[in-house]
Image: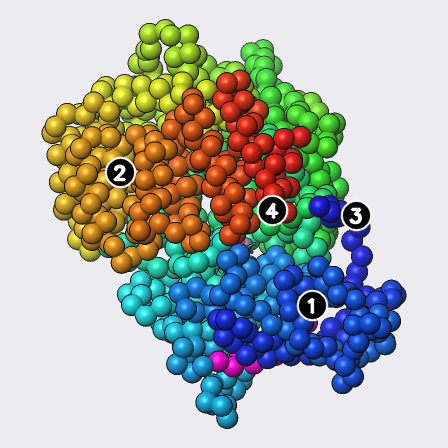
Amino acid sequence: IPTIFRQDYCPYPFKISHLNLIFDLDAAHTHVHSEMLLTRVNPGSDLLLHADGLSLLSIHLDGRELSAVTDYVLNDDGLRVLNPPESFTLSIVTQTQPDQNSTLMGLYASNGNLFTQCEAEGFRKITYFPDRPDVMTQYTVELRADAEQYSVLLSNGNLVDEGVLDDGRHYAKWIDPFKKPSYLFALVAGKLVCQEEKFILASGREVLLQVWVEDGNLDKTQHAMESLKNSIRWDEQRFGLELDLDRFMIVAVSDFNMGAMENKGLNIFNTKYVLANSRVATDIDYANIESVVGHEYFHNWTGNRVTCQDWFQLSLKEGLTVFRDQEFSADMIGTDSGRAVSRIGDVRTLRQVQFSEDAGPMAHPVRPDSYVEINNFYTVTIYEKGAEVVRMYQTLLGRDGFRKGMDLYFARHDGCAVTCDDFRAAMADANGRDLAQFERWYSQAGTPVVTVKSHYDTDLQQYTLTLRQSCAPTPGQTDKSPFHIPVTVGLLDSNGQEMPLYLVGESSAQASCVLELTDIEQSFVFDRIPALPTPSLLRNFSAPVVLEYAYSDTELAHLLAHDSDAFNRWEAGQRLATQRLMQLIKSVQAGEALSLDSLYLEAVGLVLNDENLDPAFRELVLTLPSEAMLAELSAEIDPHAIHVAREYMRQQISAHMHKDFYQVYQANQTMGVYSPDAISAGKRGLKNLALAYLVSNDADEQMISLALTQVHEAQNMTDRLAALAVLVRTGDECAIEPLNDFYQDFADDALVIDKWFSLQASSPKTDVELVRQLMRHPDFNLHNPNRARSLIFSFCHANPVQFHAKDGSGYAFWAEQVLALNAINPQVAARLVRVLDHWRKYQPALQARMQDALLTVANSVGLSKDVQELVVKMLK
Ligand code: HT7
Ligand code: ZN
């Protein structure tokens, strides 16, 4: 399988000013008539057009039918037109079979409707075209279809004509006024209904906003619509960016490979990120909808107006847009502590998933140098680490400096396909800064470790922090050069007050300052420090690094109680918990008696009972690092010891603070009409955390009935699901009836049935046999990615103690499912492959069984590029 290299980039030799597409739509056979105007702009000879699984019906150049013998060559991945003229029109007719397309890329059918997904390389499944992001074209699209079955016909841009055809079918004609790459093309045809609103932009211009769903779902579109309006306002206010179309549409589809897609003016969404009302959606669903709607909307500028030169630059649009959606979600909460809660959530994902990607066989730079299958590079490194890289510009340049950089980026590159270097240059030039070394965040993989040492000189009243950086080798990169790392710090006195910071040589004081670490080792000296401080390091997680400092327990308790940086308050609590958990894991392995000291319990007890603190923050402090996080921190992963240690600590916390949890449970009930706002959601989160602690493994009858009552009386899905989850986790009979009732109540709602599958699959009491049994349930369907994720992925990802069963039964199941999915949908199969990324880090006995499973997959015939690339890299 060929590897594509970044260094091989060549500009496309032709400009395509216009593309006219006519679709005769039908689920069994769709005909696509394409007409493009081409002009040579770069030297070269033949014209290369991509294709994937297309049937070519005809091809004409300036009206003349081309001959397969003399004029063109067809092969597996495209068509080569030999010696074309300098300027010409090419007309091609192709046929596709949407209802046979189970990959959900290109044109496909879902519940009788037709949808497209073109990013990254799906357009080549629709027609012959240079399917690469740097070929930007103006599209005119006519959709023709049966008027009853496909009553709604949508595409990008503006609707310019519609009517009835002579044969009784109907048509709609759309023109997108903006040039775009093929990956942003979209069409939707089907029986759909919409919620629509006219909306006035800051400039006074009126636009039409629509959210399209299947009939019966209009009671679940309000939150997506609100989120869209908030996103439009936010981009106007924070970045001065206005919606550039007269109409903006969101369409929900239940068969979708990822979360959503930012096609110009016609965003297509997984139903999971659109549909919500209090009966069926949790607070987390509401928050995710807001963030994904924002993300796709923000792409209109960062991705669509300015796009990527090639797919190696994917993080140019994804990292930047994730940063924008994170900032949007934080701003929507509004308070400082809300911003910290939002930041903590983002950092937890980064550490748990991206740090481990960076430490495994799939580690790659934010701007990779090569790939086999681009779909495998829609990773947490490109998205989440990419967002951290963008955030560091803001930390280094300040909010205003960052805005200046963004303004210059758009001024320079609007309408163009550019690179990560262009973005960095705009940031540097707009601020008169040298950001040359910052380039290493794009070119070097791996998570840097920053080790900090401190020294206090009583006589000089000086405090010195010495920072040293290193970065472990990653595949293909053995030696790393130093990164440019912003480390935000503060110093606390013994009362927990912020000390004014006078960096040597600077006359003005700050409460927090950004130290710029650019060498391997650097010292920073603070003057006028009257007594030994407690350092608060890497505030707000100012860089995606591991920070090592030999904190004492008392220092951590001090930070947890007092730090003005809420992120570092939480961080101190996590450090205390992690140290204890790692010790407990060792004790479990050594067969020693387990114990937990009171310092930790007292320190977190203060937070739990502090009613002045935001409930969402208290919930986060009381949440132990996940089993996945502990695995990431282990030199050799023992999933069983991790599980036992963490459960023990949960029980100890529960036993010591039983009364407090009960009080918190009662005090944080939300009454009245459901609202997903951050305060109410935070209260529910804390209350349900308290419930989970109260119903710990050996829960008494009273606590079980508390959970049962909540299941029965819950007025919203958040409370119902949380109570059901704690019952299922007991593994007792008490869960059977509520689980059945839940199924009966929501049998018609696919997204809720996904929750029902997922809840069972991720319970530590559910073994692989029960998962196999659930796969035989009439509602299970491997073709639907949400359903596959809800059962198979939930088991393999979120149920480590059962998935890593010592007999290897979990791994055998994994191999079977990878192969089954490979035949249906390679993209989804490849996501499942990644569960075994870290097989070499597990205990030898588990490793051997994982290797067997990997080899079973690797040695199978008919592997897709997606799966093959991953298993080859993992077994290397
Ligand atoms: N830019 C979109 C990525 C995406 C995608 C990629 C490959 C295959 C299917 C896909 N669906 C969506 C989504 C985003 O990041 O906004
Ligand atoms: Zn995106």
Asked if the stretch drawn in magenta spans residue 144, the answer is yes
Say above or below: 193 vs 825: below
Q: Mark 4 highlights which residue?
A: 862
Q: Earlier in the sequence, mark 4 or mark 2?
A: 2
Mark 1 vs mark 2: give the one in front. Answer: 1
Q: Residues within 10 Å of mark 2 (few under 14, many from 20)?
A: many
Say above or below: 507 vs 422: above
Q: Mark 1 highlights which residue?
A: 129
- Residue at 70% x, 77% y is 58
Q: Earlier in the sequence, mark 4 or mark 3?
A: 3
What whole-number distance in Å separates the C-alpha atoms at marks 4 and 2? 39 Å
Q: Earlier in the sequence, mark 3 or mark 1?
A: 3
Residue 552, horizontal then vertical, whole percent = 46, 14
Q: Is residue 166 left or right of residue 644?
A: right
Residue 696, horizontal then vertical, whole percent = 24, 26
Q: Mark 2 highlights which residue?
A: 725
Count how many numbered circles sit on residues in the image: 4
